[in-house]
Image (spheres, rainbow, N blue to C red):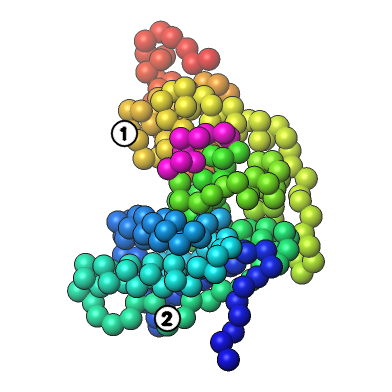
Amino acid sequence: MQRVWRTVTGFYHVCARGTGKQLIFEGDEDRWEFLELMRECCRKAGVTVIAWCLMGNHVRLVLADYEDAMSAAMHRLLLTYARRFNKRTGRTGHLFQNHFDRRSLDTDWQVMEAIRSVHADPQEAGISLIERYPWSSFPEHLCAYDGDAADVARGFSDPSCVLELFGSAEGFIAYSLSTPDSGEPALRDMKETEWERHAFANKLAKELGVPLNGVKTVPPAQRDTVIVGLNNAGFTVRQIERYTGIGKSTVSRIVRARARTAMRAGGNVM
């Protein structure tokens, strides 16, 4: 007898793994292709991507499916990606395990926990902090709270569910960075000044030409301008490191170099 997977809420936690722990991404080009295919396959099937995270040998998703179309969308996604990956790399055989794992999410708390768990995967694996990992929907959800419509439109998830569930950026980030016990976790107390400080830093960085999460990838001259601008505004080297993901030694070197230049020119750093 075929198992009925439908959930009362329409939400599912899904995981697709490489067969035999096979790496399913060899580079960023593979990851972008998977994300584009994911968006295409889910949209055509009427399935909504709530959250996602790409790891080396597996993918984890939170999906909303009200038309019982998730299985078809996932099979199409995984099969199409596997064919393209095998052709590009010259490998043969199955890339993914025969069946992807899925778990129904029947309460708001279960949906919130699944979103937290998906975003926490790289941190729990010892790869990266949640807020610094580039291949998850965590930054997309933050952009939605910031009201950045352009960035949201370019994303691969629908943040409306997250906005409704968590209510505020502070609540979403606090929950995401928490380590809950076996019971329903409570939101940690947050220092409002820290979030205000981060928001101000991001606003300042944008005024200097690039948002905080993009400072690491821009040309050195533009990167240095933003770092010095943040330092001049009162942000410490450690704060700049935390907000941009650029190493402390690099930030210190840039700040010191600009300070020396200003001194030689007879100016001062304010």
Q: Amino acid at mark 1?
A: Pro
Say if 213 sits above or below 58 in the image: above
Point out residue 162 in the picture as x, y percentages from the top left corner.
Answer: 63, 49
Magenta residue check for 203: no
The magenta-colored residue range is 146-154
Question: x and y percent of residue 136 in the render?
Answer: 49, 54
Main secondary-structure element of the magenta-colored stretch: helix
Q: Please, is residue 88 above or below residue 231 in the view?
A: below
Q: What residue is shown at x 79% (from left), y 55% (from top)? A: 186
Instruction: Please provide percent x and percent y for residue 71.
Output: 48, 72
Q: Which residue is mark 1?
A: 219
User: For the point 57% across and 47% down, which residue is it?
Assistant: 159
Residue 116, position in %: x, y?
Answer: 63, 58
**The residue under label 2 is which amino acid type?**
Gln
Residue at 45%, 75% in the rendered image = 17
| Farthest-out residue, front | 67
Quarter of the N terminus within the rendering: bottom right
Neighbour tally class for label 2: few under 14, some 14-19, many 20 plus, Cα within 10 Å? some
Q: Is residue 37 left or right of residue 176?
A: left
* Nearer to the camera, 260 or 235: 235
Question: Which residue in the structure is indicated by mark 2?
Answer: 97
